[in-house]
Image (cartoon, rainbow, N blue to C red):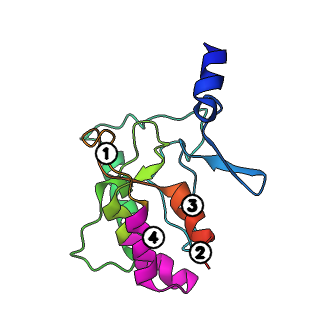
Amino acid sequence: VTAFAQAIFHDQANGSLVIREGKTVGSSLLAQKFDSDRYFWPRPSSADFATVPSGASNLGPTSADLKKQVADREASLRQANKLPPDAIVPRDLLYASGSGLDPHISPEAARLQIPRVAKARGLDEQRLTDLVERSIEKPQLAFLGEPRLNVLMLNLQMDSMR
């Protein structure tokens, strides 16, 4: 099985590592912590993006702790992105995924962050919008899942913009 995986699915069998200039910068399968205004932010992680203790928080829908976490995240996102009170914050920026390491965000979550990232980098918003739109991955087989963006790959593409 190992030989077959190495021969046929070499990148996946080795962790889908992303290498830039000979240096491993992450994996396309695992979220990484980005908290600078210069980058798009991933979904929250209940394990603070650590891979060994990854997993859900196990807080249920009636949990006061979960309600407080979500309210705090929403307030922080509204402040960082200068959102008006009536702006809708995408749910994937408020709730952690089951693994706490989901590398993707929704197109809406990326679009919400464009003004903040553009301002921090001194980039034209339209140029960044074009990059986001080009980076949207379609559902697998055109019907499995939702459109999404890989945050690491989006941020790396943005770093290479001139």
The tag earlier along the polypeptide, 2 or 1, is: 1
The tag earlier along the polypeptide, 1 or 4, is: 4
Q: Which residue is mark 1?
A: 139
Which region is colored magenta?
A: 112-134
Residue at 40% of width from left, 36% of height from top? 98
Q: How far is the residue under mark 4 from the one under mark 3? A: 18 Å
Q: Which mark is nearer the camera, 3 or 1? A: 1
The tag earlier along the polypeptide, 2 or 4, is: 4
Q: Which mark is nearer the camera, 3 or 2? A: 2
Is residue 26 found left or right of 89 in the rendered image? right
Q: How far is the residue under mark 3 from the one under mark 2? A: 18 Å
- Callout 3 secondary element: loop
Can residue 94 be seen? no
Amino acid tagged 4: Leu
- Callout 1 secondary element: loop
Query: Which quadrant would the C terminus be assigned to in this image?
Result: bottom right
Q: Which residue is mark 3?
A: 34
Q: How far is the residue under mark 2 from the one under mark 1? A: 26 Å
The tag earlier along the polypeptide, 4 or 3, is: 3
Quadrant location of residue 155?
Answer: bottom right
Residue at the extreme top: 1
